[in-house]
Amino acid sequence: MKTLKDNQELQEDIFWLDGWEGKASSGVYVRNPLFEFIKDCEKRGLKVVGIRKPKDWNMEVIVEENSK
């Protein structure tokens, strides 16, 4: 039997609201270009480590600093 660690395709990243505590449920899906944008970042060697959503909804993708 394969586990999540054995199968790269099943791994996922989940970004939680900072400081939020409580119950959550799944079921709301939205199609948008963010997934393709993150894949493009990864192709360019950038590691996405967070997403910031300001009140105006102009989302910011936060990437790991490169120490080179």
Image (tube, grey):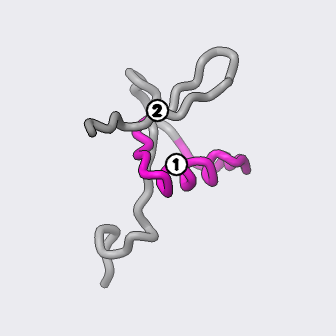
Residue closer to the observer: 38 or 15: 38
Element on which disc 1 rests: helix
Q: Give the answer, above or below, for where 60 lies relative to 55.
A: below
Q: Give the answer, above or below, for where 58 lies relative to 26.
A: above
Residues drawn in magenta? 25-50
Q: Residue furthest right?
A: 31
Q: Residue furthest bottom?
A: 1
The quadrant of the image that shows the C terminus is: top left
Of mark 1 and mark 2, the one earlier in the sequence is 1
Q: Is residue 59 left or right of residue 2?
A: right
Q: Which residue position is annotated with label 2?
A: 62
Q: Which mark is residue 59?
A: none
Q: Residue at x 26, y 36 (%)?
A: 67
Q: Give the answer, above or below, for where 49 lies relative to 4.
A: above
Q: Residue 63 placed where, x, y %?
A: 43, 37
Query: How far, Cα to Cα, is label 1 from label 2?
Result: 11 Å
Q: Which residue position is annotated with label 1?
A: 41
Q: Residue 36 placed where, x, y %?
A: 63, 54
